[in-house]
Image (cartoon, rainbow, N blue to C red):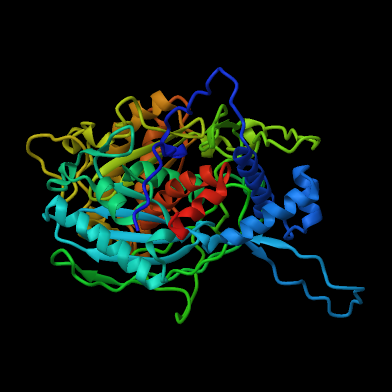
C-alpha cells in the first residue's frame, strides 16, 4: 500500500515561522465542521482526569449531546479513543450500569526517532504519548557510504518495528538526527564532513518511500537541545510542567537495547523493547528513552530500575500557548501559531460548532506559563566525536537563516599552549590550529577518576578553552542555562571528569561574561538526540490531531 504524504507537512519545532492566514474569509464545509469538532472532543478526552463521561464532553465542548455522541463513536471506530474500564465500585451501591468513560489510545499510531552517528545508528519507536515502545541499535563502520548508512537506518527502524509488532501504516512520522548542516526545510543534509557521501544521500526520500509518512532530518545538536528542554536539564519547575502538560508526572522504567554489528546492507540485527509510562495531556507527550547499549540494562528482568532525569520523568507537551486558529478551506484545515510556543497546538483553538451551540473562548496562557527563563533561553553543547550546539531562545529552536545556527565546531578555540598551566589533552594536535576542539582521550577521562594529576590538569584546561571559545556566543545570546552533553561520560567512573569539566568551564566563563548563565550536565546522556527526535516527530502528528484527527486513520485503512 502506498499512501502519499500530504502536500504540506508542518514541523512546528523547526523554528520556522508559522504559515500566514489568508485575508479572505474561509469557506466552511460540513466536513470541516465535523473534523474541527472531532479535534475538540479528542483534546478533552486526552486532557481530562479522570477519563470523561459523555456529559462531561458535552459540557467541555459546548456541543450538543447527539453531536458529541456521534463524534465519540467515530473516534472510537477510528481507534483513537476507547471506552475505559469501569472504576471499581466495591462497597458502593449503584442503581444501574455506570456511564461510559472514554480514554485516548496512544497505540493508535507511532513515531520514529533516529540518531545517526559515524559508528552507530539507533532507531526508537514511540507511541502517541511519546512512550518508548522499542529500540534498536546497529554498529557500523565509520567510513561506509551514504547509501549503506541509509540502509542501516532502514534496517534499524524495521528491527524496532518487528520487535514491537507494528506495521508501516501505523507509523505516522519520523525524524532523523544527524551530524552536519541541514537545510531549513528539514529535507536534506547539506554538509556532513565526518560521514562519507552522506550529504549526497536523500535519506528523507528513502525513508518516505519506505514508511509512507512525513519524514524530517535535523541536526543532532538541535534535537539534543529540544530533548533537554523537554525532559532533561532544561525543563522548568514542577508547577510549570503541570501547566504545560495538564497532568502529574509518573516515573519511567527503561530497558537498554542490545548492540550488534552491521557489516553490510541488509544484515539482521536484534533490538530491545523499552517500556515506559507517563500520562497524556492536551498536546504532544513523550518520554525519555533508554540509554545506549553501553549502559547497564534496566527494566523487566534486571536487578534494578532507575529514573531517567533528575528524579522523575515528565509528560512533555507541545506548549499550548499558541493563539491557534483553524483555517478551514474546502475540506482542509490549517494551523497557525501567533504566539511564542514551540509548536502549534489546540489550546486556543477556534472550534466551529453547530448552529446554536455556545463557542468557548479559552484564554491563552501567559508566555511565562509556558517556559521559565532557563527553559526558554538555553544553549546545549554536544560533546561527542564532534562539537556542536543547539540554541533555544524565546522558547523556540534557533536555526538561523541557513539552518546553521549553533555550529560552534567551526570556532577557532584558544590554543592550549597560549594559556599557562593548560596542557593539551592527549588527543589534541599541537601543529596547525584547526577549528573546534578535539575530544578528550578516553585515557584522560578515566585518569581523572583515579586521581591522575596530569589528567586533572588536562580536563580543567579543556573546560577553560571551551568557555573561552563559547564566551562570544554566550555574550551574544545571553542564555539562562548552558547544558553540557554527557555522551563522552557514560559510566559512573567518568562522573568525576564530567563534573570537573563543568566546574572549570563555568568558573572561567564567569570571568568573561557580564551575566553568567547557570551550567548543568545533561541528564539524558546518549538519549538527548533520540528524545528530541521523538519530540520533533510527535509535533507534526499533533498538528493533525488538533485539526483533523480522523484523517490519520485513513493510513491504517488504506484509504
- Residue 24, image x, y percentages: 57, 18
- Residue 339, image x, y percentages: 57, 28
Quadrant of the rendering where the N terminus is positioned: bottom left
Looking at the image, residue 475 sits to the left or right of residue 450; the answer is: right
Looking at the image, residue 304 sits to the left or right of residue 411; the answer is: right
Looking at the image, residue 323 sits to the left or right of residue 255; the answer is: right
- Say which residue appears at 45% left-offset and 54% top-offset: 559
Q: Is residue 461 visible?
A: no
- Say which residue appears at 31% left-offset and 50% top-offset: 208
Q: Is residue 467 visible?
A: yes
- Residue 141, image x, y percentages: 14, 60
- Say which residue appears at 81% left-offset and 54% top-offset: 55
Quarter where residue 506 is shown:
top left
Quarter where residue 119 is shown:
bottom left
- Say which residue appears at 79% left-offset and 75% top-offset: 88
Which one is nearer the viewer's eye here, 41 or 174?
A: 41
Q: Is residue 516 above or below residue 107?
A: above
Looking at the image, residue 391 sits to the left or right of residue 140; the answer is: right
Amino acid at each position: 500500500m502506498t499512501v502519499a504524504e500530504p502536500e504540506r507537512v508542518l514541523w512546528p519545532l523547526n523554528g520556522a515561522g508559522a504559515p500566514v492566514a489568508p485575508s479572505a474569509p474561509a469557506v466552511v464545509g460540513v466536513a470541516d465542521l465535523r473534523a474541527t469538532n472531532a479535534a475538540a472532543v479528542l483534546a478533552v478526552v486526552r486532557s481530562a482526569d479522570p477519563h470523561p463521561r459523555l456529559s462531561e464532553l458535552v459540557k467541555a465542548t459546548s456541543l450538543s449531546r447527539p453531536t458529541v455522541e456521534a463524534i465519540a463513536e467515530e473516534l472510537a471506530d477510528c481507534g483513537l479513543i476507547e471506552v475505559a474500564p469501569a472504576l471499581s465500585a466495591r462497597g458502593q451501591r449503584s442503581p444501574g450500569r455506570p456511564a461510559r468513560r472514554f480514554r485516548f489510545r496512544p497505540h493508535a499510531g507511532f513515531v520514529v526517532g533516529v540518531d545517526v552517528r559515524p559508528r552507530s545508528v539507533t532507531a526508537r519507536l514511540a507511541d502517541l504519548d511519546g512512550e518508548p515502545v522499542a529500540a534498536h541499535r546497529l554498529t557500523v563502520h565509520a567510513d561506509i557510504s551514504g547509501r549503506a548508512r541509509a540502509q542501516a537506518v532502514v534496517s534499524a527502524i524495521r528491527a524496532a518495528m518487528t520487535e514491537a509488532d507494528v506495521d508501516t501504516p501505523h507509523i505516522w512520522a519520523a525524524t532523523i538526527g544527524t551530524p552536519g548542516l541541514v537545510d531549513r526545510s528539514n529535507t536534506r543534509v547539506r554538509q556532513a564532513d565526518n560521514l562519507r557521501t552522506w550529504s549526497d544521500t536523500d535519506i528523507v526520500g528513502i525513508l518516505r518511500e519506505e514508511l509512507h509518512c512525513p519524514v524530517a532530518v535535523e541536526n543532532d545538536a538541535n534535537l539534543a537541545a529540544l530533548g533537554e528542554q523537554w525532559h532533561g536539564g532544561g525543563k522548568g519547575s514542577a508547577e510549570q510542567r503541570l501547566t504545560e502538560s495538564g497532568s502529574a508526572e509518573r516515573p519511567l522504567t527503561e530497558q537498554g537495547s542490545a548492540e550488534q554489528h552491521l557489516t553490510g546492507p541488509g544484515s539482521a540485527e536484534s533490538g530491545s523493547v523499552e517500556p515506559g509510562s507517563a500520562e497524556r495531556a492536551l498536546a504532544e507527550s513523550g518520554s525519555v528513552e533508554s540509554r545506549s547499549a553501553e549502559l547497564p540494562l534496566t527494566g523487566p528482568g534486571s536487578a534494578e530500575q532507575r529514573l531517567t532525569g533528575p528524579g522523575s520523568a515528565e509528560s512533555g507537551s507541545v506548549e499550548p500557548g499558541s493563539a491557534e486558529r483553524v483555517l478551514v478551506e474546502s475540506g482542509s484545515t490549517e494551523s497557525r501559531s501567533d504566539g511564542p510556543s514551540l509548536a502549534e497546538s489546540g489550546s486556543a483553538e477556534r472550534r466551529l460548532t453547530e448552529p446554536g451551540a455556545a463557542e468557548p473562548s479559552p484564554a491563552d496562557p501567559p508566555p511565562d506559563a509556558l517556559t521559565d527563563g532557563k527553559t526558554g533561553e538555553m544553549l546545549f553543547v554536544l560533546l561527542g566525536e564532534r562539537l556542536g550546539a543547539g540554541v533555544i531562545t524565546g522558547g523556540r529552536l534557533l536555526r538561523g537563516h541557513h539552518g546553521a545556527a549553533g555550529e560552534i565546531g567551526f570556532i577557532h578555540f584558544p590554543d592550549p599552549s597560549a594559556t599557562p598551566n593548560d596542557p593539551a589533552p592527549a588527543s589534541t594536535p599541537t601543529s596547525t590550529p584547526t577549528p573546534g576542539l578535539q575530544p578528550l582521550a578516553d585515557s584522560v577521562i578515566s585518569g581523572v577518576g583515579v586521581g591522575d594529576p596530569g589528567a586533572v590538569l588536562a580536563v580543567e584546561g579543556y573546560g577553560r578553552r571551551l568557555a573561552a571559545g563559547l564566551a562570544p556566543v554566550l555574550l551574544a545570546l545571553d542564555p539562562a542555562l548552558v547544558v553540557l552533553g554527557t555522551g563522552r561520560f557514560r559510566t559512573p567512573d567518568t562522573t568525576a571528569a564530567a563534573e570537573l569539566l563543568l566546574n572549570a568551564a563555568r568558573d572561567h566563563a564567569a570571568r568573561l561574561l557580564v551575566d553568567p548563565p547557570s551550567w548543568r550536565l545533561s541528564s539524558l546522556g546518549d538519549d538527548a538526540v533520540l528524545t528530541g527526535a521523538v519530540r520533533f516527530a510527535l509535533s507534526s502528528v499533533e498538528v493533525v490531531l488538533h485539526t483533523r484527527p480522523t484523517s490519520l486513520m485513513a493510513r491504517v485503512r488504506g484509504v
